[in-house]
Image (tube, helix red, strand yellow):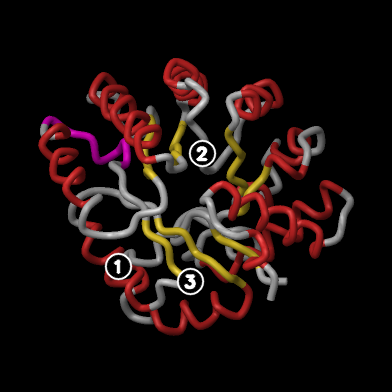
Amino acid sequence: MLMIDTHSHLYSRKFQDDQAAVIARAKEVLSHVFLPNIDLPSIPEMNRLADLDRSFFYPMMGLHPCSVKEDWETVMAAMELEWDRNDYVGVGECGLDYHWDKTFVTAQKAALRLQIEWAKAKNLPLILHCRESMDDVIALVREGQDGRLRGIFHCFTGDLAQAQQVQDLGFMLGIGGVLTYKTSELPQVLADVPLSAFVLETDAPYLPPVPHRGKRNESSYIPLIGKRLAEIKDVTIAEVARVTSENALRMFGMKVDSAVS
């Protein structure tokens, strides 16, 4: 069974010298790669990549919190026009980031609220970035949840209580390379969370799993994450592949049987 990468930036310039080879490696182990957007400049490259194979790449539309600046309303107005120009399968990557710069926290929250409304209006999953801001993202999602919201807390690194809150809101946990790090506390947290709550992701080119830590990440490394999750849950990697793929396809409103190869 092939696996699914629910969060990858393979359109990044970090892949410009060997993108074809990276894609070929990904297709050996994956059935789908979902592409979250970052800002306005990233849209053409993301769509160019998606156009190479629309049965493999699935683009999304959103404004990354680190890209929220003074002109965020103008940027998001331009992004609204994109919904009629292409087939996007999710809203994101959006959320809050308190790690790099808190100058635009108020704007980040306003942008997230708007994207929450997009997700509800379009019946699409919300892909949430919550670096050092988990509780605030949970609070904003709870504020907007009227039964129509669903999505993924990308790069989940929270505690068990936060994991439960995410599930209670009808969202899933995006599990990536951090799970493989020796210093990570995720294994202890995820041991008490059901497999039905997870999807797998790389966040390529960032956060590569062991043994590639410190290098460029790529989508073909998903099995390394799946293997570690299988060890933690004491199941086979085939079971992890099946369940997380089904979870991902349901999240994005796709036929589950297409996960099997």
Q: For the residue marked with disc 2, what is the amino acid?
A: Gly
Q: Is residue 177 visible?
A: no
Residue 223 sits above or below residue 177 on the image: below
Amino acid carrying label 3: it is Phe
Q: Which residue is mark 3?
A: 56
Q: CA distance from mark 1 to mark 2?
A: 27 Å
Residue at disc 2, secondary structure: strand
Alpha carbon separation for disc pair 3 and 1? 20 Å
| Quadrant (top left, top right, bottom left, bottom right) of the N terminus | bottom right
Give the mark nearest the N terminus, 3 or 1: 1
**Chain-order first, disc 3 or disc 2:** 3
Q: Residues within 10 Å of mark 1 (few under 14, many from 20)?
A: few
On whether residue 236 falls in the magenta region, the answer is: no
What stretch of residues is rendered in magenta?
A: 64-70
In 3D space, how far apart are the residues under numbered discs 3 and 2 (Cα atoms)? 20 Å
- Which residue is painted at 76% across and 35% down in the image? 193
Say above or below: 253 vs 196: below
Q: Residues within 10 Å of mark 3 (few under 14, many from 20)?
A: some
Q: Which residue is mark 1?
A: 13
Location of mark 2 (residue): 151
Q: x, y (%) of residue 80?
A: 20, 43
Q: Which mark is residue 103?
A: none
SS at mark 1 in the image: helix
Taking the spot 24% from the left edge, 58% from the top edge, the residue there is: 43
Question: Is residue 178 found left or right of 48 in the rendered image?
Answer: right
Residue 74 seen from this side: yes
User: Residue at position x 68%, y 63% from top?
Assistant: 224
Q: Is residue 93 left or right of residue 171?
A: left
